[in-house]
């Protein structure tokens, strides 16, 4: 390589290092803190994961039985006032059933098939959840794999949680600055990370659904922020 080019490259690197050092010095001392905000709320809607399961000697037979059961479930949901747009198919499967032969060395043989299908259902009437589950069971539903609770409009809660997170971060910054005997300056940077809407989940399986008590409880909305403050002596 040309010596002049090498010299230019080295000079450029040195200038970059000097500029970076000067920039860091201009920034001055800082303090970085994180804050968290948590807001509890009573949910006003639920999501059910429910469905049907049927077995038969053939795959077509199992699918036919499951289809008939699902038709009954859909009719029960409609009769309960659940709108079609609030119902969505989430899974549809057919799997073989195996049986081990007397000769253990031989591969298991297929003795039948199991068909299953699940729906995700949005429910606004939380007080009527137990009655809805009864109707679904009577209509042919024999699977309930989950219930989650949420709020229809979470944004106001998120705003409260973010405000609480900022207050928490500012309180920490003031505490640290006081303990270090320095003056807390202006906010230089603020960023959000890890905010979310966790939902309690009750997991249940198979057919024991009738007259099941359902408690919505509370959900918690969280927000997390990171703030950078200037500090002085």
Image (cartoon, helix red, strand yellow):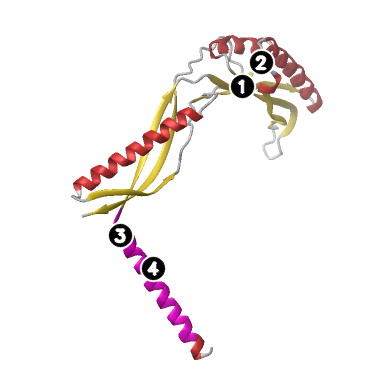
Residue at 80%, 23% (x, y): give it: 61
**Secondary structure at numbered mark 4:** helix
Q: Earlier in the sequence, mark 4 or mark 1?
A: 4
Query: Distance between the Cα atoms at labels 3 and 4?
Result: 13 Å
Between discs 3 and 4, the one toward the N terminus: 4
Whole-Å distance between the Cαs marked 1 and 3?
A: 53 Å
Dot 3, how many residues are within 10 Å of its Cα: few (below 14), some (14-19), or many (20+)? few
| Vertical side of 6 occupied by 170: above or below | above
Q: Is residue 177 left or right of residue 71?
A: left
Give the alpha-carbon distance from disc 4 to disc 1, as whole Å: 55 Å
- Which numbered disc, 2 or 1, marks the residue that appears first in the sequence? 2
Does the CB distance between marks 1 and 3 fall below 8 Å? no
For mark 4, what is the residue?
20
Q: Is residue 188 left or right of residue 111?
A: left
Q: Secondary structure at mark 2?
A: loop
Taking the spot 47% from the left edge, 84% from the top edge, the residue there is 8
Q: Secondary structure at mark 3?
A: loop
In three-dimensional space, the C-alpha distance between marks 2 and 1, rounded to whole angstroms, equals 8 Å
User: Nearer the observer, disc 1 or disc 3?
Assistant: 3
For label 1, the residue is: 122
Which residues lie in the magenta part?
6-30
- Near mark 4 (Cα within 10 A), the count class, few <14, some 14-19 or many ≥20, is few
In the image: residue 233, left or right of residue 140? left
């Amino acid at each position: 390589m040309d010596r002049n080019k090498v010299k230019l490259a080295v000079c450029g690197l040195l200038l970059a290092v000097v500029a970076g050092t000067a920039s860091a010095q201009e920034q001055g001392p800082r303090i970085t803190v994180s804050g968290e905000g948590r807001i509890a709320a009573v949910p006003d809607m639920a999501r059910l994961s429910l469905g049907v399961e049927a077995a038969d000697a053939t795959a077509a037979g199992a699918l036919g039985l499951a289809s008939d059961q699902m038709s009954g479930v859909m009719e029960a949901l409609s009769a309960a006032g659940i709108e079609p747009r609030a119902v969505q198919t989430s899974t549809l499967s057919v799997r073989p059933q195996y049986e081990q032969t007397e000769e253990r060395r031989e591969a298991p043989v297929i003795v039948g098939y199991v068909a299953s299908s699940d729906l995700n259902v949005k429910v606004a009437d939380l007080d009527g959840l137990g009655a809805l589950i009864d109707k679904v069971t009577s209509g042919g539903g024999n699977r309930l794999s989950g219930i989650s609770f949420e709020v229809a409009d979470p944004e106001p809660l998120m705003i409260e949680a973010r405000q609480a997170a900022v207050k928490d971060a500012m309180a920490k910054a003031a505490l640290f600055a006081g303990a270090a005997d320095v003056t807390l300056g202006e906010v230089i940077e603020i960023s959000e990370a890890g905010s979310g809407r966790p939902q309690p989940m009750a997991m249940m399986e198979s057919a024991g659904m009738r007259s099941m008590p359902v408690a919505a409880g509370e959900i918690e909305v969280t927000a997390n922020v990171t703030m950078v403050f200037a500090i002085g002596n």
